[in-house]
Amino acid sequence: MGLLVVGTLAFDSVETPFDKADNALGGSGTFIAIAASYFSGPVKVVGVVGEDFPKEYFDILERYNADLEGVEVVKGGKTFRWAGKYHYDMNTRDTLATELNVLEQFDPKVPESWRSAKYVVLGNIDPTLQLKVLDQLDNPSFVVCDTMNFWIDGRRDELMEVIKRVDMLIINDSEARQLADEPNLVKAAGVIREMGVRSLIIKKGEHGALLFIEDVIFSAPAYPLEMINDPTGAGDSFAGGLIGYLHKTQDVSAENLKRAVIYGSSMASFCVEQFSIRGLEDLSDLRINDRFREFVRLSAFDEPTA
Ligand code: AMP
């Protein structure tokens, strides 16, 4: 049974200190599905768009093998829109606008034949919708949940409910501090795991990521890129690479999760090199595996012999 993703399909308007793009293809579901497609067969996408979502964007998703049977097109509706502006360091951003549009009335329906999906990503979307999707699944083996400050602020109770029911939560450092109400990340991780989630990943933007599972803490480096054009979707590409690799290998042991974190980091590093989804386009197994190996070399060192 394939890999199932719920998330947003969006028009993104992004401004960096160096360039800008309007109404680019974005959304958590989009980035996750494309990143995961390099590892897994057809990714089953549950989401919603308005009639304004162009055929050209559907074509891109289909080119990456996304199965769009679970995507509702709302007649006369407007697609979710997000606008953001990055600061000079490209690591911090301000959200300028979030227009939920068709998301507001969305009642996700997981097609009957998808309900036995074993690997699932609840991408960044309203936690109420994440819960509705969870309720329709038969008996998933591994469910990953992503979220962001917008939902931690606005839907905290529902998010707490989701956290209790998933196997892994992926958030960034500022979201971890916000969720746990604790400035120290290691302590914050402890507080969040007490909320009932088995494993946790805290992404630190250009400083890598931390994986907490059982009594293990794994620190992954970030790839030192000279050129970052658009960090939008890095977190989702990370989640897509991670779940795609887990689905491909059917192994959720702590050791394999570490490798999945590096594949996730590799996909995020490709994503930020170009605007919108362009950095994820036309990759090959060779390039992805080369980048994986570069990550290994980045943090490999020997113990002193004497
Ligand atoms: P990331 O950079 O990985 O955090 O994700 C950026 C993507 O998330 C963009 O393509 C946006 O369309 C999407 N996004 C932004 N805000 C939200 C939100 N409140 N809920 C769901 N998706 C969002």
Image (spheres, rainbow, N blue to C red):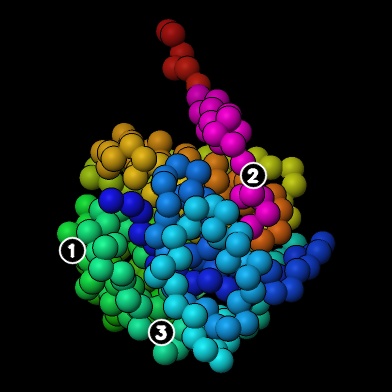
Instruction: Tell me which label, 2 or 3, sits earlier in the chain.
Output: 3
Residue shown at 23% from the left, 71% from the top: 136
Residue shown at 64% from the left, 44% from the top: 282
Can you say which quadrant of the picture contains the C terminus?
top left
| Badge 2 density bin: few <14, some 14–19, many ≥20, Cα 10 Å | few
The amino acid type found where label 2 is placed reads Asp
Does any portion of residue 238 appear in the rendered image?
A: no
Instruction: Tell me which label, 1 or 3, sits earlier in the chain.
Output: 3
Query: Marks 1 and 3, Cα distance to the nearest angstrom?
Result: 21 Å
Which residue occupies the foreground of this view, 279 or 55?
A: 55
The verdict on residue 296 being magenta is yes
What are the residue bounds of the magenta stretch? 277-300
| Badge 3 density bin: few <14, some 14–19, many ≥20, Cα 10 Å | some
Q: Position of residue 197 (x, y in %)?
A: 25, 60
Residue shown at 55% from the left, 60% from the top: 61
Q: Which residue is mark 2?
A: 282
| Pointer 1 residue Cβ closer than 8 Å to ligand 1 | no
Does any portion of residue 255 appear in the rendered image?
A: yes
The verdict on residue 136 being magenta is no
The amino acid type found where label 3 is placed reads Phe
Q: Which residue is mark 3?
A: 106
Ligand 1's quadrant is: bottom right
Left or right, 70 with respect to 118, comes to right
Instruction: Tell me which label, 1 or 2, sits earlier in the chain.
Output: 1
Give the numbered dot on residue 138: 1
